[in-house]
Image (tube, rainbow, N blue to C red):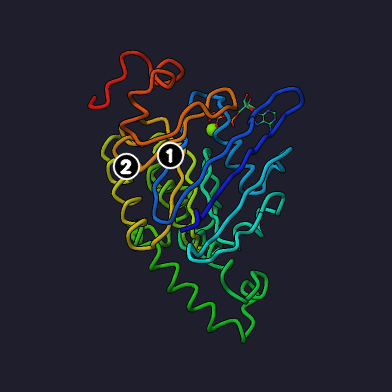
Amino acid sequence: MNPVLEVSKLSMNFGGLKALENISLDIFQNEIVSLIGPNGAGKTTFFNCITGIYTPVSGDIFISSLPQKTEKENICGLKPNIITKKGMARTFQNIRLFQNMTVLENVMIGRHVRTHAGIIASVLKLKKTRNEEKKIVDDSYNILKKTGIENFANEKASTLPYGAQRKLEIARALATEPFLLLLDEPAAGMNPAETIELGLLIKEIREKENISILLIEHDMKFVMNLCDKIFVLDYGKKIASGTPDAIQNNPVVIKAYLGEDFDFDA
Ligand SMILES: Nc1ncnc2c1ncn2[C@@H]1O[C@H](COP(=O)(O)OP(=O)(O)OP(=O)(O)O)[C@@H](O)[C@H]1O
Ligand SMILES: [Mg+2]
């Protein structure tokens, strides 16, 4: 089985700063994988490189959205909108919603990636787009249901509680029908109950939508309980990879990130 994402020797510089150095990782279908490491390690930069926001200085980013497909495609250097169309969707560390639009409209924006009607035609309500528009509304509402925020459908995004805004970002990403969902600190700012709920939602997405998930997160209890495997970055380098068990017992990771008194059960 091919990995759905195979990143090979990816490097990125900002002036003299080596933000990423020769990073390789792979993700297989239905895996939940985490990218962890200290502040400034290069985690968000990695997301920005594989989603086309930055063009890496070197390396390859192969995708293979159908695992049985033998050929893989190098998407390195493609524009973000093309990469979304190819099935990689993301959320952002700092929430980026259309704050003045309703919750439903935010998801509809994501849905337009998979429809023929252009956004402008839809806004103008051209006749031929009306049927498709109705389907977009129905599909978007269903995605809100899946993420448990359908009660907010007609509220402005800006009025949502913080945890629900993070879920709305996930809903908008899901609306693009990804094979891989990338979440940048999805639990940041959530209270313990919201974090538990988020973990359940991510597992449900993996099971029901049959997709893979790569997430950046600092909440180690959340990561260790949720993920199949973990990659650890430090100063732009990959310092470890493995199962949660292996990672929490890895002396290099403990020294660089987890700390000597890290307690998995805390
Ligand atoms: N656009 C940019 N221009 C210059 N330097 C940048 C840029 N983006 C990131 N950096 C630098 O690259 C390094 C990696 O940053 P990045 O945001 O990827 O870290 P991170 O692992 O996501 O950290 P955090 O956990 O704090 O979100 C940092 O030193 C950061 O200051
Ligand atoms: Mg970051």
Quadrant including the C terminus: top left
Give the number of the disc on residue 34.
1
Indicate the quadrant of ligand 1 in the picture.
Answer: top right
Give the number of the disc on residue 62.
none
Give above or below for 237 relative to 115.
above
State the residue in front, 218 or 260: 260
State the residue in front, 117 or 185: 185
Of labels 1 and 2, earlier in sequence is 1
Image coords of residue 62 (percent x, y): 61, 52
Name the quadrant containing residue 142.
bottom left
Q: Residues within 10 Å of mark 2 (few under 14, many from 20)?
A: some
Give above or below for 129 relative to 34.
below
State the residue in front, 71 or 16: 71
Q: Amino acid at mark 1?
A: Ser
Image coords of residue 63 (percent x, y): 58, 56
Label 1 within 8 A of ligand 1 by Cβ: no
Image coords of residue 200 (percent x, y): 28, 49
Image coords of residue 264 (percent x, y): 27, 26
Residue denoted by label 2: 226
Q: Residue furthest right?
A: 15
Query: In the drawing, does residue 177 fall left or right of residue 79?
Result: left
Mark 2 and mark 1 in contact (Cβ < 8 Å)?
A: yes
State the residue in front, 200 or 145: 200
Q: Residue furthest left?
A: 265
Name the quadrant containing residue 187.
top left
Alpha-carbon span between mark 1 and mark 2: 9 Å
Q: Secondary structure at mark 1?
A: strand
Q: Secondary structure at mark 2?
A: helix
Residue at position x 31%, y 14% from top? Answer: 261
Query: In the drawing, does residue 130 fall left or right of residue 203?
Result: right
Q: Residues within 10 Å of mark 1 (few under 14, many from 20)?
A: many
Q: Amino acid at mark 2?
A: Leu
